[in-house]
Image (cartoon, rainbow, N blue to C red):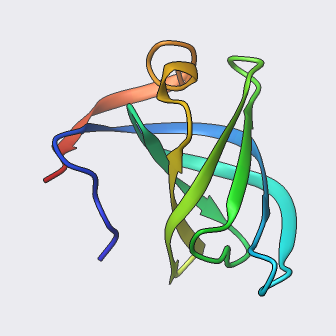
Amino acid sequence: MLERHHKQIHYDCLDLCDFSWHGTRASNVAGSESAILLEVWHAGGLFQTTQAVPKRAKVLIGAASSGEQVAGSVQSCREDAYGFLVEVHVSNPAKWFPAVYQPPYLTRQTRVAA
């Protein structure tokens, strides 16, 4: 199960984001791709990637709809039928959703994380 942050409303959404990461010095893993943002909340998001991204890796998210880049860290990563589901906590929520970043396809509230 993906880890959830306390009392944050999660929304289904759909957006394509630039997504790059680098792991810890010990893992020495890095990568970059276009990731699909599937779910968004005030302090993070759930991304679909084609590659596994290590837990605690530092990420940089660039969304075309906002023109901003936001830093964060990976909370969890698990494989599914289409690739990997990567949960990210953003470092500065004031530069994220909904203050600065609004996905073009924001559908509905999915849950309140507990």
The residue depicted at 83 percent of the width and 78 percent of the height is 29
Residue displayed at 16% across by 41% down: 7
Residue 37's place in the image compared with 64, above or below, is below
Q: Is residue 81 above or below residue 112?
A: below
On the image, the x and y values in percent for residue 94 come to: 50, 20
Residue 60 location, quadrant? top right
> Which residue is situated farthest in the bottom direction here?
26
Q: In the image, what residue occupies the spot 59% across and 61% down? A: 48
Q: Is residue 15 above or below residue 45?
A: above
Q: Nearer the viewer, residue 94 or 109?
A: 94
Measured as percent of width and height from the top left, residue 23 is found at: 75, 72
Pick the front one: 78 or 91: 91
At x 53%, y 26%, the residue is: 96
Q: Quadrant of the N terminus?
A: bottom left
Q: Residue 80 location in percent, x, y?
A: 50, 80
Q: Left or right: 50 with respect to 44?
A: right
Give x and y (percent) for residue 64: 76, 25
